Image (cartoon, grey):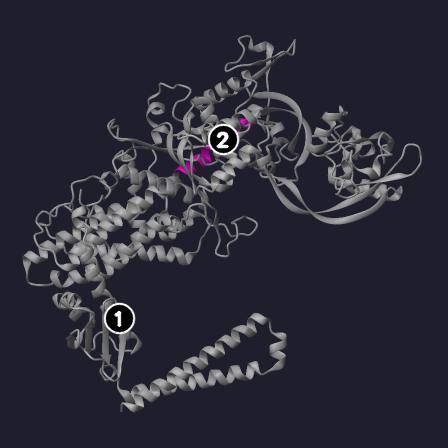
Amino acid sequence: MREIDMDTKYSPKEVEAGRYQKWLDEGVFKPSGDKKAKPYSIVIPPPNVTGKLHLGHAWDTTIQDTLIRYKRMQGYDTLYLPGMDHAGIATQAKVEAKLREQGISRYDLGREKFVDEVWKWKDEFASIIKSQWGKLGLSLDYDRERFTLDEGLSKAVRKVFVKLYNEGLIYRGEYIINWDPQLQTALSDIEVIHKDDQGAFYHVKYPYADGSGYIEIATTRPETMFGDIAIAVNPSDERYKDIVGKEVIVPLVDRKVPIITDHYVDKEFGTGMVKITPAHDPNDFAVGNRHDLERINTMNADGTMNENAGKYNGMDRFEARKAMVKDLKDQDYMLNVEPIVHSVGHSERSGVQVEPRLSTQWFVKMKPLAELALKNQKTDSRVNFVPDRFEDTFTQWMDNVHDWVISRQLWWGHQIPAWYNKETGKMYVGEEAPKDIENWTQESDVLDTWFSSALWPFSTMGWPDTDSDDYKRYFPTDTLVTGYDIIFFWVSRMIFTSLKFTEKRPFEHVVIHGLIRDEQGRKMSKSLGNGIDPMDVIEKYGADALRWFLMNGSTPGQDTRFSYDKMDSAWNFINKIWNASRFVIMNLDENTPAMDDLSKVTSYDLSDKWILAKLNQTVNEVNRLMDKFEFGEVGRNLYNLIWNDFCDWYIEMSKATLTGEDGDAKDQKRMLLTYVLDKILKLMHPIMPFVTEKIWLSMPHNGKSISLSSYPENHDEFKNEKAMSDMDVLIDLIKSVRKIRLEANAPLSKAIDIMIKPQNDDIKEVILNNKDYVDRFAHPKDLQIDTDLEAPALAMTSVTNGTEVYIPLAELIDLDEEIARQNEEMAKMDKEISRLDKKLSNENFVKKAPEKVVAEQKEKLADYKSRQAKISQRIDQLKANK
């Protein structure tokens, strides 16, 4: 149904109001069901239900939706599948923080009631996220929406766990892991953020047990001394060969420990001696395994010291450190305290300092899975990284990957499918619970969030049911769009799990984008207060403007900076499209045929041939660039076609015909304008869905939604190099006259003499055949066009594409007025030069001011002197011609 209400000014709120619901009601976002069409699928990277979407999500999903809309219009059977992630540790942390404000802990509630509270949180924020998806215009098929704790996905998780366990690729063991003392859970290596902290090297005496002296040991964590089991030196270190095998006493502990050798020790670092604490350091753990050393854990799960810490039992780890340092000093064990700044791991979720801790956890043996992924990258079924440099990031991590700790001491998540017999202690691992469940206790730990999200591309399609219609039709998916910050977390895990369980890559392409930073290039964060809510941006500028900014500023793999100036530019561009479209639509009549119909156009002038050639050129470029994911270049091409070619030139050149008396010419121009606008709207629709739909429905057509129309394709009959080069001559010519007018302060309303000297007869013919354009856009009084013209003695000259343009100066200005104006400019220059000369001759200023400031002042002085010389020359010329 045609909608023809277009206000004089673009109003995003009015344009977008109710549009998304109409698309949903019309089923626009559902797969076409056409089995002859090639399928194209994207699964949304599931946002965490921890809170609202941020600008990074908006960037991510805008790219995805643009690709889906583009492919849908190209005739693909598209599926854009929505869903969300339970985000175990992150969501539980949010809910626990909320409960703490009420004076409640999860232990007060118990597991079942606490999980109920988390589900309430999930429902609240899932609803918010879905409304935000709608605001952004994402063409998602909500009938297929998934959640990582859905029963279907839970079934997939259990199947994967059990298979890996049965193959020996999942195991349970005691290892040093990263421990979050606040959330009291294990963390994987990539959930740890390293930050520079103020710390110290504590140089401590360790006396020989025989009383013959002491050795010096430096540590940054004296609170772990209660877990010291040995002192190690490098076996090739000649300095210590005579003391290997002797014993020293651990200060404050009075435990004798041996001096051993191990190649782990760097003899060039510090004293070349290190204390070995197997329960509190991953490297010491490895040394302890090699030497069969005891493991003494000195801390509780909450970061307080335990009974192995003697009198410090129950103290917070950092308070214990202070107390121990004081005692070491008082008992003459402390040799020196050396302040340092060092990199320390912090929990990504709680922010607290991570504690390396000996713990029994579940692990995935990564080497065989990593080898599977790396081997696949050497085949035709490889995952294509865009930009390809990120494949190096992927392979380097896979080459050096550690076993993955997958258990988390949480209550929110996929509970590990392992049960322990209450009587025998025997462990059972299976996809279903034991039949005599009353005799078994399930493992209390849950799986790392990334374990379930690693299955996302195929579990959402119905796997492990490999006969499901969606799995057979839409898996593997085509394109994953995500940020470079989760290549380790998510991309790599999806690749190896998909290859392991489906024998297929999860997606053909992974398009990597960067981060959105503020105007100063800083990462957006709560602490800086520089975060931008995408919904606030949409409220002010509209979704289309935000989407245009996100796509147009998008170079694969690079960060981008958000600014309101860029948003202003985006809104202005849409307003330009709106006004141009409104002009075209207002000039249509009831006889104007459908937009794709040029059959009744029998005559094409140069501007018609040119705009069709430019349109076709842009169509081909945009299709090529979209398929290469070069979205910034897509935007540049579209902007040039729409703003420069269509709005600034073709529409303006069409106005004479539309206001003329030739009815047939009017009709043909209307058809051409309608045709070109139709193609422009279709080109823009994947990026700007709302405004293009509104305008398109205001034009004569037979379709329901522009989303279901065909994307523009190449038309060889529109190719016309001569029309493009001829129009370039005319446009450059007109631009040069306008520039001269601007420089001479001569308004377009004033007719002036113009002399045009074409380079050859062909160009002369082009100008003569299109003299109407020169008359209309250059406003000549007397127009001369000849290859033999001589330049006047005093004229403003411009060399353009194929011509030289001369405009006699007397035609532009009153010489007396111009001399007076130039004298005023000369007086300004004299004043500025005098001021700067005085400033730069002041020794105090030159010595005290920053070098950059002095250099800037010197540059200004040189510029003013240059302008002074040109003004003087100009005045002399003017006076000579009076």
Q: Which residue is mark 1?
A: 736
Disc nearest the viewer among 2 and 1 = 2
Report whether residue 92 is seen: no
Label 1 Cα neighbours within 10 Å, binned few <14 / some 14-19 / many ≥20: many
Q: Looking at the picture, which amino acid does disc 1 mark?
A: Ser
Q: Which quadrant of the rendered structure holds the N terminus? A: top left
Mark 1, secondary structure of its residue = helix
Q: Which residue is mark 2?
A: 374
Q: Looking at the picture, which amino acid does disc 2 mark?
A: Leu
In space, the residues marked 2 and 1 are separated at their CA atoms by 58 Å
- As drawn, 598 above or below 850: above
Mark 2, secondary structure of its residue = helix
Q: Position of residue 64 (x, y in %)?
A: 37, 40
Let me know if residue 127 is in the magenta part.
yes
Q: Are marks 2 and 1 in contact (CB under 8 Å)?
A: no
Q: Position of residue 739 (x, y in %)?
A: 28, 72
From the viewer's side, name the closer residue of 123 and 670.
670
Does residue 230 appear to the left or right of 584 in the view shown? right
Q: Residue at x 7, y 52 (%)?
A: 602
**Mark 2 or mark 1, earlier in chain:** 2
**Secondary structure mainly formed by the magenta segment:** helix
